[in-house]
């Protein structure tokens, strides 16, 4: 019997479950409401199209186009390498400083872009929200998905850098002697070993995604009511960057309890994870990553419920 | 819920919070003081848990109150009412864009809403890309869009520009494309809000035709409009909303009749004091203070038989004495605003010179008889200085009634709303002409 039903569904693609005649009841909701993830699944095509639009439109009418996705983290890496790695002599866990900082800047740029975009996403989609019904969660999610394209490009450059620093281990590097302005030539650090740890990379990327989405859910919902959020996000991004081991190694923090508190910032786990998986830095990031993951999960679940609770006011207030 | 019922609404209410009216700040100092204090006030109300209080929204209004109705499957319902009566709010609730504050509604079937065409269009994307994007936003699946793609493009008449970014489109092309996507949505229940009021007349007619097609396909349609003619053409039943409540429910004709009467309290008085009428236009400098109607015998009356003579007199007061001539006119309209007759003194080469600085003048027009169907008609008088712009034009304040009597004999078939104009006609039996010979003889005649 089940097979007949399935066959009929196969024959009539127009009658996929969402579209079949169904009854729904409209009534006021109070307090906390369910996430309705099933409905999210039904609207996956909309998610796809909104993401696609974001990607398509982002670099329209620019000369450099997609190259911008690489320029930003790359130039930051150059500046960091000159000032922190060169002038200030910040240690880099035994890895050449440019690779060390770029391996962190790539996931960080993704996170920063995704968080900023999703925080402003609902206000930006005000017109849609006031005129069409769809699960509102689609909006912040799509704005976290679209920066993944930028991430992929920057990541390719990161791989290029790792290969460069591995293949040419005997090449001499031009560096500033720490603390001075004299240019010296020193032998390059030994090759970067590629280990099996790289299979963990998708997990760390997912962690960055979750964190960006979590913050995006909180902030976008608040932004609908209070545009203060719009002015707050740039500061937040800046402070958060210094609270994340991008320009400096997390290994500078030696006290174990301090390390755990430090890794309540989920991006600590992401960045340390990236370095561990790609560069083979042996900083035992395991416990930090666990703490970061739990923190990100808590932030995400809280954010999703907060978002759903505030959702009913969006169309009226935005 | 009965299986043939598509929408069942009970006690739907929606409360909006609106900002309390503020005093206008008279000095810069007060403005600055207020700006400095505001964040602290908002923060404190936020801490007290008043989400909206924090945004300074304290006063509330009911945009919708206790709205209950039922719509059967396949019914085409017109929702009419003045601006702010709650029509759009009702559609927003039914399409789940916003939640009701009270009450509930059961909706059976997939809902598509057309509250605005072109929602989500992006100027940088091409016509093709926008069709897919907009279709997805309106809830269509990709295969549905693919299936109807050519039809939409043809409807919008943008074949040549389909791969051009829409920012290069003319506004007409943009609207046509936007409407084309929306019009090809195939939900079981369609909610439409004023989307027909776009584009030029030709395109509006095309849209109306498309809506008609949708309506006859057996889909349930809720149609919000200010255009009574469109509503009458499309809908079977009507709901009149007034101040957020259902004021009337019934056939579309009864609903329109109710609405037009409520909004134009029809005065049957043959003498209308127009001094308090606010619905008027003109450059000012004088006004029509009253209007009087009389029948062919010169007796005050507003009930006329079809084709019977009557007269309209407008009494005019000027603010200052002028040494000019006046021209006047009378427009006769249907209650839905369609203009039927436009009488002008200048078309009769009649001028009304003001002599000796007089500030008051009365102008009367004798109408030989109008071949109008029975019903109530609006009479709108206006006047101007010679070849100048209208000084005063009184809208929707004076009415006459055409009764089912008069020069046309067979009253049986002359009923309200069966037509607009009557004409004298004579009927006879004629000789049958075969098509071929008829065509041949016509060619010869040329």
Image: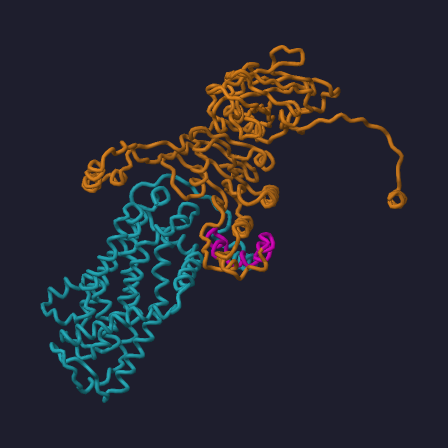
> Where the C terminus of chain A falls, by quadrant?
top left
Q: Which chain is orange?
A: B
Quadrant in the picture for residue B421: top right
Q: Determine the main secondary structure of the stretch shown in magenta.
A: helix
A25 and B209: which one is in front? B209
Q: In the image, B297: left or right of B278?
A: right
Which residue is farthest bottom?
Answer: A170
Quadrant in the picture for residue B304: top right
A205 and A77: which one is in front? A77
Task: Please say if B119 is above or below B63.
Answer: below
Kindly identify the residue that appears in the image at 56 percent across and 26 percent down.
B257
Asked whether the viewer can see residue B251, the reply is no
| Residue B39 screen position, x and y as percent | 21, 42
Taking the magenta stretch, the answer to whether it contains residue A57 is no
Magenta span: B133-157
Task: Please say if A276 is above or below B363.
Answer: below
Quadrant in the picture for residue A64: bottom left
| Residue B142 screen position, x and y as percent | 51, 58
| Residue B81 screen position, x and y as percent | 48, 31
Task: Please say if B430 is above or below A133.
Answer: above
Question: How has the structure been colored for display?
Answer: by chain
Asked whether the viewer can see residue B190, the reply is yes
Kindly identify the residue that appears in the image at 57 percent across and 30 percent down.
B387
Q: In the image, B142: left or right of B213?
A: left
Q: How many marks?
A: 0
Kindly identify the residue that appears in the image at 45 percent across and 43 percent down.
B95
Q: In the image, A185: left or right of B202?
A: left
| Residue B80 screen position, x and y as percent | 51, 32
Which residue is farthest left?
Answer: A255
Chain A takes which shade in the image? cyan
A134 and A110: which one is in front? A110
């Amino acid at each position: 019997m089940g097979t007949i039903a399935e066959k009929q569904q196969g024959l009539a693609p127009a009658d996929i479950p969402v579209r079949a005649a169904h009854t729904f009841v409209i009534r006021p909701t109070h307090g906390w409401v369910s996430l309705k993830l099933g409905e999210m699944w039904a609207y996956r095509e909309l998610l796809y199209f909104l993401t696609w639009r974001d990607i398509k439109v982002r670099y329209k009418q620019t000369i450099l186009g997609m190259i911008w996705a690489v320029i930003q983290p790359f130039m930051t890496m150059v500046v960091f390498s000159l000032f922190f790695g060169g002038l200030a002599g910040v240690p880099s866990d035994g890895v050449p400083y440019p690779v060390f900082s770029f391996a962190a800047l790539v996931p960080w740029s993704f996170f920063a872009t995704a968080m900023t975009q999703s925080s402003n996403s609902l206000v930006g989609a005000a017109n849609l929200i006031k005129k069409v019904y769809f699960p509102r969660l689609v909006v912040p999610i799509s704005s976290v998905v679209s920066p993944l394209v930028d991430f992929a490009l920057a990541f390719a450059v990161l791989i290029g850098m790792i290969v460069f620093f591995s293949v040419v281990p005997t090449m001499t590097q031009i560096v500033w002697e720490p603390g001075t302005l004299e240019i010296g030539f020193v032998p390059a650090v030994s090759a970067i070993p590629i280990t099996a740890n790289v299979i963990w990379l998708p997990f760390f990327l997912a962690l960055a995604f979750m964190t960006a989405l979590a913050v995006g859910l909180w902030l976008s919902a608040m932004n609908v009511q209070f545009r203060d959020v719009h002015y707050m996000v740039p500061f937040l991004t800046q402070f958060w960057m210094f609270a994340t081991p991008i320009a400096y190694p997390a290994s500078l923090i030696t006290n174990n309890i301090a390390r755990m508190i430090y890794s309540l910032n989920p991006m600590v786990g992401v960045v340390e994870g990236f370095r561990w998986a790609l560069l083979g830095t042996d900083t035992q990031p395991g416990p930090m990553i666990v703490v970061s993951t739990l923190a990100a999960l808590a932030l995400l679940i809280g954010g999703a419920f907060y978002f759903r609770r505030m959702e009913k006011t969006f169309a009226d207030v935005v | 819920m009965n299986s043939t019922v598509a929408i069942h609404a009970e006690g739907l209410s929606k409360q909006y919070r609106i900002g309390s009216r503020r005093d206008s700040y008279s000095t810069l100092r007060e403005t600055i003081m207020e700006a400095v204090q505001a964040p602290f006030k908002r923060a404190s109300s936020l801490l007290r848990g008043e989400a909206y209080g924090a945004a300074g929204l304290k006063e509330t209004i009911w945009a919708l109150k206790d709205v209950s109705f039922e719509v059967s499957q396949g019914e085409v319902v017109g929702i009419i009412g003045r601006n702010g009566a709650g029509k759009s709010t009702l559609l927003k609730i039914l399409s789940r864009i916003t939640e009701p504050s009270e009450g509930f509604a059961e909706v059976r079937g997939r809902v598509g809403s057309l509250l605005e065409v072109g929602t989500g269009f992006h100027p940088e994307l091409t016509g093709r890309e926008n069709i897919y994007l907009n279709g997805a936003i309106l809830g269509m699946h990709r295969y549905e869009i693919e299936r109807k793609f050519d039809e939409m493009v043809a409807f919008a008449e943008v074949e040549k520009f389909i791969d051009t970014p829409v920012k290069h489109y003319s506004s007409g092309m943009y609207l046509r494309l936007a409407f084309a996507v929306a019009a090809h949505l195939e939900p079981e229940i369609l909610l439409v809000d004023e989307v027909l009021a776009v584009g030029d007349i030709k395109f509006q007619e095309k849209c109306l035709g498309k809506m008609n097609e949708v309506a006859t396909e057996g889909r349930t349609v809720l149609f919000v409009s200010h255009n009574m003619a469109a509503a009458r053409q499309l809908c079977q039943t009507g709901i009149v909303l007034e101040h957020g409540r259902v004021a009337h429910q019934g056939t579309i004709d009864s609903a329109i009749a109710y609405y037009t009467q409520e909004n134009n309290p029809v005065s049957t008085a043959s003498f209308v004091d127009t001094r308090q009428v606010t619905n008027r236009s003109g450059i000012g400098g004088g006004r029509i203070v009253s209007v009087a109607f009389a029948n062919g015998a010169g007796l005050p009356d507003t009930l006329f038989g079809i084709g019977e003579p009557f007269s309209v007199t407008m009494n005019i007061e000027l603010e200052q004495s002028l040494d000019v001539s006046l021209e006047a006119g009378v427009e006769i309209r249907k209650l839905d605003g369609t203009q039927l007759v436009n009488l002008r003194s200048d078309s009769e080469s009649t001028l009304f010179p003001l002599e000796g600085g007089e500030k008051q003048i009365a102008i009367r027009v004798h109408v030989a008889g109008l071949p109008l169907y029975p019903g109530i008609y609006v009479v709108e008088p206006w006047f101007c200085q010679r070849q100048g712009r209208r000084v005063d034009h009184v809208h929707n304040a004076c009415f006459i009634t055409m009764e089912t009597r008069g020069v046309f004999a067979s009253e049986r078939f002359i009923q309200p709303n069966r037509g607009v104009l009557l004409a004298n006609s004579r009927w006879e039996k004629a000789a049958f002409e075969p098509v071929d010979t008829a065509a041949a003889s016509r060619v010869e005649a040329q």
